[in-house]
Structure formats: C-alpha cells, structure tokens
Amino acid sequence: MQATTDQVANYIREEFGNEVKSEQLLKAADHFDLTYQTVVRRLSDFKVSRGKWNLTIDEVREQLETTVVDQPSLVPSKDKNYVPFGNFADLKKILKSKIFYPTFITGMSGNGKTLGVEQACAALGRELIRVNITVETDEDDLIGGFRLVDGNTVWHNGPVIEALQRGAVLLLDEIDLASNKILCLQSVLEGKGVFLKKIGKYVTPSAGFNVIATANTKGKGSDDGRFIGTNVLNEAFLERFPVTLEQEYPSPAMETKMLNNYCTELQCCDDDYIKNLVTWADIIRKTFDDGGVDEIISTRRLVHIIRAYSIFSDRLKAIKVCLNRFDDETKQSFIELYDKIDADVDVTVDNPLNL
C-alpha cells in the first residue's frame, strides 16, 4: 500500500527538516518507491515557491491560534462631516444585531456606499477590515499564505482570516471587479469559516463576524459601459448574499447639510454657493436618469469642488478644475448650466489659466 501524504511529510520533516527543496523530495520518492511527480502532487499545499516547500505546520497553527487582544483596534474613526441617509439605519441594525447576515450594497459611484459602512462601524464601535477588490485578487490575497521574512517562509493571515478571528466586519469593496477567484469565499459567506489547506487548519468565525460587499452594479456586469472592468459574478456567489441594499444619492437637503459640514471644516462657508451646487447636481442627475446626458455629478465630486473652492476662493474655477476629467462637450454643457443657476458667475469672462 502506498504511503499517505502525512507519512511522506513526516518522513521529510524528520530526515531533512521543514524547509526542503527538490533534492529532498527525490529522496523521499525513492524511500517510499513513489515517483517524484507523485510526491510533488502530494505536497502541493506546502509549496511556497519554485523548487521550495515548507512543512512548518505546528508553528503556523500556533500563530493562527494566538489571541488578538494585543493587536491595535480596527474600529474606524468617526467622520464629523458625515450625515446618515438612505440605508444607513438598516445597515446599522444589521451590524448591531451581530447576526451573520452578508449584505450586498449597490449604487452609483461616489454616493457614499463605502463611507456609510465605515461610519456605521464607527458608530457601533465595530472593527472593520476593508479589502479593495480587483480582477487580480485571489485566494492568497484574501485568505493568506506563506511570506518570505528574513530568509524564512512564515505564514501570514489574509484579511478574511483576520476578520473571522476578530469577529470583525469584512468589507469587500468594489466586489463586481472580481474574477471567479473570489469563489474561495463560498464557505465564508455561508458562515462556516474556512479550511486553510496549506497548513491543515480550520478557522471558524468569531461572534459578530459579518461580510458587507459594495458594487456599482448588481453583479451582472455593466451593459452601458460606464463601469468598465466590472464582471458578471457567479450566481451561486451572489445567492449567498441574502439582502441587497440599493444606495441612491442623498436628497438635496441631506447633501446641503453634508457640504455645509465640509465648508465649516475648511473655513470657506458660502451658503449661496452650496445651494447652487446642490441644485445644479440635482438637475444633472435627473437629466441623466432621463437619458439626456451621459455623465453625472456625484456627491464625492461636490465635496471635491468645495475643497477646490477652499483653495482658490473662486466659484467657477473650483467647478472647472473638478470637471476637467469629462470630455469637452460635457464639461462645457455642465458649466453653462451652472451659469444659469448662479447669477454671480459669468462664464464669458476669460480665464487666463484656461481652467
């Protein structure tokens, strides 16, 4: 009967130590009358780089089981400028309950999806671990893996394992940019924890652990091309989110309050300017919804304009420098619209900097 994987691994540890190369695997293959390829396949979970394997199991397990008492708090700081709106109250209830209830938040760019999660955690004193997802994000980025430290290979927990052990909120930001590699989280999204196959350790979630995902789409891709790079997510993956919250832009009243807060902080208060900006953005959004324009002014961009105004002390210039990312036609139409709203602004005045 052929030797088991544990027998092969134990033999190598006893004869050659925990860190080995191809030469030692060849000797193990001869000892057990196996092919080299069979031994390599058996020890695939222990491979750390080309021609190198690390069989340090006990030390890794001990590291995983250490407490998090002495680690710094991951509770986000409260943003005094944030104004709760939309689904904030519902999201806060979900997190306050400490019931495992994965939540998918979808909405247009720049409308406060991520900030809302951060501020809900800040208000509740909940630890938050945020992971910005890209198409390159894989199991090693999320779960963890071996890293080279001072010439030694050491296991490092990924953000998912950290959140599981700490009972923290795991925020998967821009989840619709992910590839099918994100499916490594299937068991995590079922509340069952995850098995770390590279070290033979099962990690179960601590009380309070939850998963929140944000996205510009609903995981079905972007038909209009606005959110290029977003992918169609696996249906089985999406089904593991029992609730989806649709995030809209804040109402004009809420947005006015937000901008007032930022103006106060930046010491550039101008009530008329804020009122005009909010009215301007609201008209553009309604026109966008009706198909009249292809671009939109987000809440984030309004904050950018306020910051620019605090620097330049010029209403029109603050708007122009923050609209330069748009094509010339869109930029000009937005500026002309603002000119009709703000009687104190004249777009016909030449700008020496062409801004």
Image: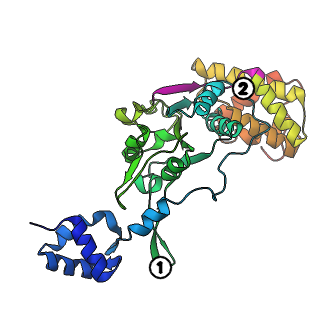
- What amino acid is found at the position of numbered circle 2 in the picture? Ala
Give x and y (percent) for residue 261: 83, 34
Q: Are marks 2 and 1 in contact (CB under 8 Å)?
A: no
Task: For residue 108, say whether it is visible.
Answer: no
Residue extent of the magenta highlight:
242-253
For image coordinates 80% across by 42% down, the residue present is: 307
| Left or right of residue 141, residue 350 in this image | right
The quarter in which the C terminus is drawn is top right
Query: Which of the 4 quarters of the picture holds residue 290?
Result: top right
Query: Furthest residue to the left?
Result: 1
Q: At which x and y percent is residue 180?
A: 37, 44
| Foreground pick, 220 / 305 | 220
Whether residue 90 is visible: yes
Of residue 348 and residue 169, the one placed in the foreground of this image is 169
Taking depth in this image into account, of 254 and 4 the one nearest to the observer is 4
Q: How many marks?
A: 2
**Location of mark 2 (residue):** 281
